[in-house]
Image: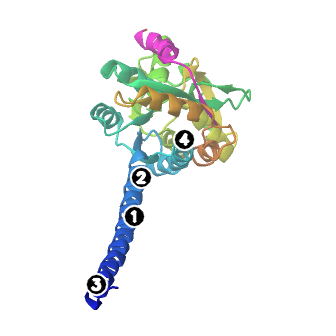
């Protein structure tokens, strides 16, 4: 028979056991909570922030607007957080690719050639493609046009001596490199042939200058010409067209893994022609965007050859 002392001891033991069990349950819940927190933070860490750069060949605000649509698409397909960066110019874009503060970049044809020379370690991802507005065929090419107004009195380039001429920017493929080469093939030294030569920076500014009467003729991309025609009617005359030019490239810095490069290539190439990004490009920039296609660095050799002539 148990004494009162024994009964008291057993009660104390049982009470302590209950408290220990309760503490153990609390401890287990705390551990589970901490594990869940760690898993959640690890999941967030696995979603990379990918910085995607582009430099302003057009209105920077418009570029930012359409590129945000592209960022949304890439985020949905890869899970990565995409940050769009519109740089001041090509030099900043190249520098940031080199130091790793940009992971991906949209780069025009001329500067792709320069970048592969200045920074050979950049990786080709894919090529932007457009639907040709004359043929309706989707192609990875476009052209440069030299354009005047119908009422300018200029019907041919050789009637433009002592007139005012405009390029876009020295870093532009269709706004400078190809039309400059086109004029030289015609035996024209622009600085001597024209009364004045302007650099207006953006393609749409050439159109604006033509309409304002500030220049007599100017160089622009074919997409800019078609946009201007849709907006202003048949007020323009094409004086000269370049050979087909490979379209812009998407590139990655050297630090992006091959697996990531292939992932972004696959995602971009799978974008349908009627995607919201292509529609935004057409509506906001006037570019006949049709998505992306896989080529390779050798695809741009025709530009390298042309620039050596």
Callout in the foreground (1, 3): 3
Task: Look at mark 4 in the image and give the residue it sits on.
Answer: 207
Q: CA distance from mark 1 to mark 3?
A: 40 Å
Q: Nearer the viewer, residue 298 or 38?
A: 38
In this view, which residue lies farthest toward the front? Answer: 1
Q: Is residue 72 above or below residue 258?
A: below
| Mark 2 surroundings: few (<14), some (14-19) or many (≥20) residues within 10 A | few
Q: Residue at x 53, y 30 (%)?
A: 265
Task: Look at mark 1 in the image and give the residue it sits on.
Answer: 33
Helix, strand or loop: magenta stretch: helix
Q: Contact (CB < 8 A) between labels 1 and 2?
A: no
Q: Hey, which quadrant is residue 31 in on the image?
A: bottom left
Q: Contact (CB < 8 A) between labels 1 and 3?
A: no
Q: Residue at x 55, y 20 (%)?
A: 295
Task: Look at mark 3 in the image and give the residue it sits on.
Answer: 6
Q: Would residue 278 be visible to someone looking at this image? A: yes
Callout in the foreground (4, 3): 3
Does the magenta-highlighted stretch encompass residue 292? yes
Q: CA distance from mark 2 to mark 3?
A: 57 Å
In this view, which residue lies farthest toward the bottom? Answer: 4
**What segment carries the magenta color?**
290-308
Which element type, helix, strand or loop, lies under badge 4? helix
Q: Contact (CB < 8 A) between labels 4 and 3?
A: no
Which element type, helix, strand or loop, lies under badge 2? helix
| Mark 4 surroundings: few (<14), some (14-19) or many (≥20) residues within 10 A | many
Q: Residue at x 42, y 59 (%)?
A: 36
Task: Look at mark 2 in the image and give the residue it sits on.
Answer: 44
Q: Hey, which quadrant is residue 308 in on the image?
A: top left
């Amino acid at each position: 028979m148990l004494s009162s002392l024994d009964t008291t001891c057993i009660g104390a033991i049982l009470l302590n056991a209950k408290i220990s069990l309760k503490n153990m349950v609390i401890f287990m819940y705390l551990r589970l909570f901490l594990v869940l927190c760690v898993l959640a933070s690890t999941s967030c860490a696995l979603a990379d922030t990918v910085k995607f750069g582009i430099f302003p060949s057009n209105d920077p605000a418009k570029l930012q607007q359409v590129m945000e649509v592209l960022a949304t698409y890439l985020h949905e397909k890869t899970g990565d957080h995409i940050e769009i960066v519109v740089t001041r110019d090509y030099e900043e874009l190249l520098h940031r690719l080199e130091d790793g503060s940009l992971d991906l970049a949209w780069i025009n044809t001329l500067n792709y050639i320069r970048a592969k020379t200045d920074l050979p370690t950049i990786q080709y991802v894919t090529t932007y493609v457009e639907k040709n507005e004359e043929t309706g065929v989707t192609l990875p090419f476009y052209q440069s046009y030299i354009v005047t107004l119908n009422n300018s009195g200029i019907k041919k380039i050789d009637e433009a001596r002592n007139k005012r001429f405009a390029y876009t920017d020295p870093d532009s493929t269709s706004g400078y490199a190809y039309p400059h080469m086109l004029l030289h093939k015609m035996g024209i030294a622009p600085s001597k042939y024209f009364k004045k030569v302007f650099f207006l920076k953006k393609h749409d500014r050439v159109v604006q200058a033509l309409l304002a009467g500030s220049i007599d003729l100017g160089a622009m991309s074919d997409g800019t010409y078609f946009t201007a025609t849709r907006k202003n009617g048949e007020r323009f005359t094409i004086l000269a067209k370049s050979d087909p030019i490979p379209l812009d490239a998407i590139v990655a810095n050297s630090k992006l893994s091959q697996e990531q490069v292939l992932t972004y290539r696959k995602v971009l190439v799978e974008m349908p022609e009627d995607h919201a990004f292509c529609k935004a490009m057409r509506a906001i920039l006037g570019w006949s965007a049709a998505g992306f296609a896989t080529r390779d660095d050798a695809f741009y050799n025709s530009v390298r050859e042309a620039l050596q002539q």
